[in-house]
Amino acid sequence: MSTQTEPPETDDETESTPEAEPEPQSPGERRRAEKAARAAEREREEAEAEPDLGEDAVTLKVFRYDPEVEAKAEPRFDTFQIPFEKGMTVLDALIAARDTYDSSLTFRHSCRQAVCGSDALFINGRQRLGCQTQIADLDGDVVRVEPLPHQDVVKDLVVDMEHFYDQMEAVEPYFQTDETPDDELEEQFQTPENREKIKMSTRCIWCGACMSSCNVAAGENAYLGPAAINKAYRFAMDEREGEEMKQHRMELIEQENGVWRCQTQFSCTEVCPKDIPLTEHIQELKREAVKSNLKFW
């Protein structure tokens, strides 16, 4: 015969279990907690410091490449949102992107007045100076910035200019004359008409935009290029240049990879930031070369 055991009687109110006191932290745990708190504080401050983009933010799409960093060795584009200000140039936007978002963004700039030529870039599909190009004048909603085409990229927007400088030096770009005034303090005079003739050619700032735009220069590494030929024009057409030196300079540009390689595409003239009529100067040197080789009996 089985017996049934009654359940023990319980009180209506259940006694609450007291909360356990937190165990004291070790020195290492305290340091980790303090470090996490500082990191959270920094994130909060950075979030509060984010610029107010407003309604007129500039979308900047920038070419990135760094062969020395494995994770960045594959070319790509990074996008930055920059607050727009009246009068902002592409160079201003690049500086803002570098200073605000990514300090590793690399590009050349110096005078910021379209004089040094160091910030020539490929902006929205055309060679331009970053400091001279107004954001407001560009078409489209995105400003696309790339390094100059047809030149080796060193990092991001910086290209190797060594070949360009070699071509410029090849035409001996400095004044050489047969005679100088007897008095060392006397000027070597030039007529206003001759000065007017060569005036535009003296404005070259060695930016390399014309060379980058030239299809012939892109395919023929030995071609002197429009900038170098324009520099030769500047001295060959100067009436103060010695006749012997002028003949020597003409021989430099008459060679196979000189003026005769120009195909008169006008691309160099179109992109020149100083409005130098480069194609016209090259054609005039072609005419001079023909005349210097004509012989009459």
Image (tube, rainbow, N blue to C red):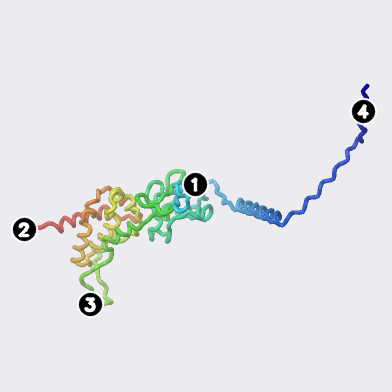
Which residue shows up at 28% across the image and 50% down it?
Answer: 220
What numbered label is drawn on residue 182? 3
Answer with mark 4 or mark 2, whichever residue precedes in sequence: 4
- The amino acid type of the residue labelled 1 equals Thr
CB atoms of marks 3 and 1 within 8 Å: no
Q: Residues within 10 Å of mark 2 (few under 14, many from 20)?
A: few
Q: Mark 2 vs mark 1: which is more N-terminal?
A: 1
Residue 297 - label: 2
So how many labels did they put on this image?
A: 4
Label 3 – label 1 distance at C-alpha: 63 Å
Disc number lying in front (3 or 2) = 2
> For the residues carrying marks 1 and 4, which lies nearer the camera in this image?
4
What is the crowding at mark 1: few (fewer than 14 residues within 10 Å), some, or many (at least 20)? some
Residue type for callout 2: Trp
Q: Residue furthest top?
A: 1
Residue in the image at 50% along x and 50% along y:
84
The numbered mark at residue 5 is 4
Upstream in sequence: badge 1 or badge 4: 4
| Amino acid type of the residue tagged 3 in the rendering | Asp
Q: Amino acid at mark 4?
A: Thr
**Real-space CA distance between mark 3 and mark 4, rounded to the nearest whole angstrom:** 136 Å
Q: Position of residue 34 (x, y in %)?
A: 68, 55
Mark nearer the N terminus (3 vs 1): 1
Q: What is the distance, in whole Å, between disc 1 and disc 4 at their CAs?
A: 78 Å
Which residue does the numbered mark 1 point to in the structure image? 79
Of residues 25 and 162, the one drawn nearer to the viewer in this rendering: 25
Q: Residue furthest front?
A: 1
Image position, residue 203 (x, y; %): 32, 60
